[in-house]
Image (tube, rainbow, N blue to C red):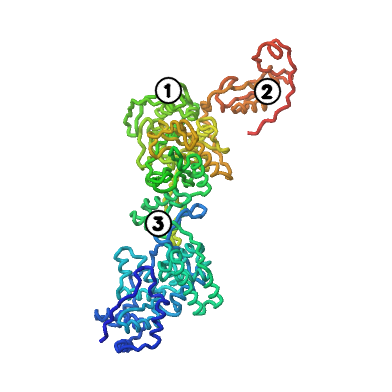
Amino acid sequence: MVRRVRLVYAEPVLADAQDDAEDGSTGLWRAAEAGRPAGADRARVIRGLGGLSVLAGVLVALVALPAMCLTGVGARDAAHWFQSEPEDLDTAGVPQRSRILAADGSTIATFYYENRIDVRIDQVAPIARRAVLAIEDSRFYEHGALDAQGTLRALVSNLDSGQVTQGGSGITQQYVKNLLLTTSQSTEEQRAAKEVTAARKVRELRYAAALERRYSKDEIFARYLNIAYFGGGAYGIEAASRYFFSKSAARLNLPEAALLAGVIRYPYAYDPERRPGAAKDRRDTVIRRMAQLGWITRAEESAALRRPLGLRVHRTPSGCVTSTAPFFCDYVQREILTDPVFGATAKEREKLLKRGGLTIRTTLDRRTQKAAQRAVDRHVPRKNSARKAAAEALVEPGTGEIKGMAVDRRLGSDKERGKTWINFAADASHGSSIGMQAGSTFKAFTLAAALEDDMPFGTRLMAPRAFTPSGFRDCEGRPLKSSERLRNSADGEGGKRFSLVTGTHHSVNTFFLVLEREVGLCETVKMAERLGMRQADGKPMEQYPSFTLGFNQVSPLRLAAAYATFGARGRHCEPIAIKQITDPAGKRLKVPSANCRQVLDKGVADAVNHVLRGVLTKGTARGMGLGRPAAGKTGTVDNFSAAWFAGYTPDLAAAVWVGDPRGGYRHPMTSLCMDGRCYGPVFGATIPAPIWRDSMVGALAGRPASGFHRPPSHYFSKGSGEDRVELPDVRGLEVAEAIAKLRSAGFRARIGAAVESGEYPRGRVAEMSPGPGRAEPGGTVTLRPSKGDDAAPPRTPEPSGPPGPGGPGGPQLPIPTIPPVQRPAD
């Protein structure tokens, strides 16, 4: 018979404490080695071990002895069970932190439940490895899963005292304990991992034996170093080294390594920040132990003991609040938390982000983001006196990549002025914003629908001073009636005819209402949808005659992506923020696609670009050019409740919103004064366009300028669509001189067949078509040179002045000799 032994585990309550560390049992080991008299029961137990052939079986039988006696399980059965491979041993699933990276690889934000960075054993300084081994398990590379020598000594002591006072656990067993606790998925599993029972201890020993068979010593040691808690929210030696010393574990020196090694046993008791005295004493214990083992010299020991702690704490916050691109970061976070591609449930997706150790490479361009944030903050300061807000989204044409996203707020509770959780630049699914009315920026969709219907630039329509909608049908064919009289904005234009070009440049409301009726409301709506537009809440856009005036609530991001389609010559891409995601093993995860496709004929897009370029040179946003080919459209919402500008080059598109988060209709911008600067009524060109210009100039600085393509010629069949100007009379001039004069007046020229003329010398312009008078700029004038006699005097234009010198009836002045002008290159 064997005396029953009551197992009382002298373990700390803290789950992270390494209770069985070598140094913690040194005094007890020495007591056993000193030859303390053993009782008869102890002797009987040890003699009973002689019949076992496997040392592991002996040890587990001894450890599990009380439980086995109670259940009737034999020692040989226990040994067989102990050596079998556990089916429930899973070493995966250890939480690791995820990082969101910009396009250049720099870190935007970090997410974690446990701040952990896994490293290989060769990425930890050798001195740090020796420090941990010295204080935790100096014989780790000499024994197996169970340290026979240490465990037998512990058992002798435990049996003699009648309770478990020593552990003797090595690094492998400590790793197992941490692994079981870290990978617990429920409260029950966590309780089981920490319970003070013989069953838990036996299970840990069995798992340790299995791990020793499965992995090399170096791999087990690396896993231990990566899972252990070091305090300060740092899990694993790499995160701990970066937290306490702002350096990687590969660069740790002796005092730093000893401090971290000493912390492992009781991270809270030896916390270097809160208990520096205790931490230093513990560090010195490790240093002395290393010298005792002969792993450092006495001189190194003495020098290290004199060193201060030398902390350089660097905290790594979790989440987007402190990010340099907080709203873009929040967009990426919501992308992962809401898209089923990252998990079937919200809980699974959150677990993947905060435990999965993901490397999330994004589309964010640091230069673009910096330029956008600077522009937004400059024109609408974060804590401005008028409490207005601004948001901008920037998208790359042809790829859909979001290059920047700026809001003039900090990410946080709106209870604190200058902060908000709402991302005004994004849809509700990615920022909680319900969107904002986009105003006249929607006129571009009506323009695109008209051009797709092959309507020439010179098509002219009467724009009444007021417009009562009639003759409209939605996409279901239902007639839409309204008694509301729609008028033009404060510029007062109306009551005359406009072309597609001039109506767009001046953003005439009633012109676009007439144009929308001409091309069809449904065609306009479908054009916007093809370009990716939908309401910010995800619902389809509402269809009313005032659709072209932009009453639907949308986000800057959607609008920027739509205008990017024009810049990409009709190729639309869904906006994307994530380019690639890899897990800790380097495996790529599936990410949302931009789903790029041609939704608009290239020629139609070229025509849209041609018209919208004039908005920046002669329209509502004149003076807002970039010094390179660019196009755009202003937007002023009814009652000045908000203002927009959307613009683009072939390389970058952006949309800017300025308004009041408290409600634009309750707080309109009719006479805005902000931080000592007054604007009066705010149009799209007042604040949004300057934000756009400053952002684009900064983002594109140093990049070669890309140009737009010339629209197909049939769009010029009714002229350029520009307002008529004076066409100069070039008859009698040398051909090259005539061409230069026409070009300077905004016209194009071509050379026709020569004609008989007795009025003009050979080679001079005899006829021009159309003739002198008022014409649309950009039109083509055909010049026909004379076949006449070289001696014939050239004709000079009839003077319009009164009689006198040089006038009718006055003296004839000699004709000056003008050197020939070379024809300029096309």
Q: Is residue 334 above or below residue 60?
A: above
Give the residue displayed 41% in from the left and 74% down from the top: 171
Q: Specify whether residue 79 is in view.
A: no
Give the residue displayed 48% in from the left and 77% down from the top: 289
Badge 2: how crowded within 10 Å, few (<14), some, or many (20+)? many
Indicate the amino acid at tag 3.
Leu
Front position among marks 3 and 2? 3
Helix, strand or loop for disc 3: helix
Q: Is residue 586 above or below residue 290?
A: above
Helix, strand or loop for disc 1: loop
Indicate the amino acid at tag 2.
Leu
Quote the CA–CA distance across marks 1 and 2: 44 Å
Q: Where is residue 52 in the image (x, y as percent from the top left)?
A: 33, 86
Quote the CA–CA distance across marks 3 and 1: 57 Å
Helix, strand or loop for disc 2: loop
Q: Residue beneath label 2, please?
A: 733
Q: Specify whether residue 171 is in view.
A: yes
Mark 3 or mark 1: name the one nearer the start of the chain. Answer: 3
Q: Residue beneath label 1, please?
A: 464
Q: In which quarter of the image is residue 200?
A: bottom left
Mark 3 or mark 2: name the one nearer the start of the chain. Answer: 3
Front position among marks 3 and 1? 3
Instruction: Determine whether, in the image, residue 164 is placed left or right of residue 684.
Output: left
Q: Position of residue 804 (x, y in %)?
A: 70, 11
- Quarter of the rendering occupied by the N terminus: bottom left
Give the residue displayed 38% in from the left and 88% down from the top: 35
Q: Where is residue 38 in the image (x, y as percent from the top left)?
A: 33, 88
Q: Residue beneath label 3, please?
A: 353
Badge 1: how crowded within 10 Å, few (<14), some, or many (20+)? many
Badge 3: how crowded within 10 Å, few (<14), some, or many (20+)? many
Confirm or deny contact between disc 3 and disc 2 (CB under 8 A). Answer: no
